[in-house]
Amino acid sequence: MDQNSHRSRLPMRARLATTVGGAAATVSRLAGRDGSVIGGIIGLRLEPGLLALLAADRQVVLVTGTNGKTTTTRLITAALTPLGQEIASNIYGANMEAGLTSALSRAPGAPIAVLETDEKYIPAMVKATNPKVVVLLNLSRDQMDRAAEIWLLARRWREALAAVPGCRVVANADDPLVAWAASSARQVTWVAAGQRWREDSWCCPNCGSHLHRDGDDWACGECGGRRPPVSWMLSGDQVIDPSGRATPLDLKLPGRANRSNAVIALAVAQAFGVHITQALGELRAVTSVAGRYTQVNRRGCEIRLLLAKNPAGWLEALDVLAPAPAPVLLAVNAQGPDGRDTSWLWDVDYRRLRDRNVLVGGERKLDLAVRLEADEVPFRLVNDLDEAVDLARTVAPNLEVLANYTAFQQYRAVLGRTQ
C-alpha cells in the first residue's frame, strides 16, 4: 500500500480532513507545541468517521492496559521492524481517538499500525479499526475521577472482544481481570507476564468470590475460574517461547515490568510471522521510550527520568532506582492527564526510601510530603529541577527523577526533550 494509492481510496471529504488536519499539526509543531493530537481533532470534526476510513486495509494492533502501554507499543513496533514495512504508531502517548487518527494520518501508506489505546476507549477503537491484534497488559485503579471502575472496564473489554471473532488477543494470563476480559475472544495467546500489584484483583471477576493465589497462579473455588494455560512466559531474564525454549532477553530497558512488556511484544511479533531471534535483536536496541529512562547531564549531574502514574506503576519504578547514595527526586502534579485525586499516594509503600536522600517537587509536593512523613521518610522540598540538581550534586554525581505524567513532561521540557 503506497501513500498515494491509499489517499486516493479515501472519499473526498476524508482527503480534505487529512490535508487540513496535517497542516494544523505542522503549524502546531512549528509553534513549538507537540502537534500529535490537533491534526486528529480537526480531521474528525471535518469527517467524524475518519479513523475507520484511515484504518481500513491496514493490519492494526491496539495496545491497552493501566501501565506499560507506551513502552509496549514502542517494543512491538521495534519487534515488527524485520517485516521491512512502514509502521504507523502513536509512540508518544496520544492514545484517544484524535491521537490514533493523527498517527494514521501521518503515515497514510503504512500497511501496519501499532496504536496505544486508552483503556476506556477500547470498545470504540476496536469497532473503528477492526484490529488484527489486541494486546491486554493489566488493569488496576487509575484516575478514578476520570476513568470508570476497573471491573466495568473489564466487562466492556469482554463485550468488545466477543464482537470481533477474527481478532487475535494477546493477554496477560497472570492478571485475573485481564484474563476474564480476554476469555470472550475466539483467538487468545496467553502470556505469563506477571502481576506485581495485586490489590485490585483479590476477587473473582466472574462471580465475585475470593481468589486463591499461589505465586502468579490463581483460581476461584466457587465458579472454577482459573489462570489459563500460557504459551509465552517470562522466567527471570529469559523468555520461554511456545516451543519451551528459553532465550535470554538482555534488554537495555531496566526492570521486570519492561521484561514483561518485551515478552508480550514477542508474542505479537509471532502473530505477524516474525521469528523470535529477529524480533529480539530489535528489542535489545531500544534504550528509551518517549523520554522514559533517558539519561541527561545537567550542571554536571547525570539525571535519569522515570515515569510512574499510579500505585502499580510506582511499585515497579521504585524497584529500578539506582542504589544509594544517588538522591531521588519525587514529583507529583494533579492536572487533567494525571487525575485530580492524589489519594492514591497512600497506596504506595515509600518506606524503602528511608535510607535515601529524597527530594520532593511538583505542584502537589505538599500532598506527597504528608505521605512521606507518615512513612517516616526524611525529605527536602524543592521548587524546580535545577534546585534539585544542585542539592543532589552535594551527595552524588547522579540524580534519579521519578515523576507522574505532567510533572515528567515538564522536566522533559526543561531538559530539552532528549529522547
Image (spheres, helix red, strand yellow):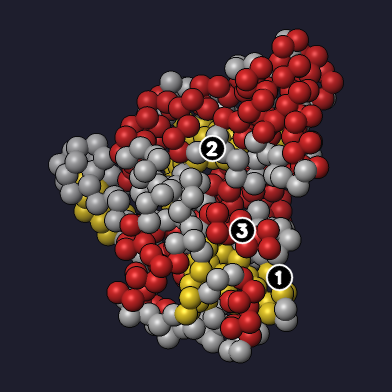
Q: Secondary structure at mark 3?
A: helix
Q: At 38% from the left edge and 56% from the top edge, which residue is drawn?
A: 342
Q: Secondary structure at mark 1?
A: strand
Left or right of residue 213: residue 91? right
Query: On the image, numbered disc 3 is attached to which residue?
Result: 410
Q: Secondary structure at mark 2?
A: loop
Mark closer to the chain start, 1 or 2: 2
Q: Which mark is residue 296?
A: 1
Q: At 62% from the left edge and 35% from the top edge, which residue is drawn?
A: 99
Of badges 2 and 3, the one in the foreground is 3
Q: At 58% from the left edge and 48% from the top edge, which residue is drawn?
A: 70
For this orientation, the residue located farthest to the front is: 383
Q: Give above or below for 367 relative to 162.
A: below
Q: At 59% from the left edge and 70% from the top edge, which residue is drawn?
A: 384
Residue 298 horizontal/vertical position (percent): 72, 74
Quarter of the rendering occupied by the C terminus:
bottom right
Amino acid type indicated by mark 1: Val
**Residue 266 shows in the view:** no
Tell whether label 1 touches label 3 (CB within 8 Å). no
Residue 1, quarter of picture: top right
Query: On the image, numbered disc 2 is attached to which residue?
Result: 117
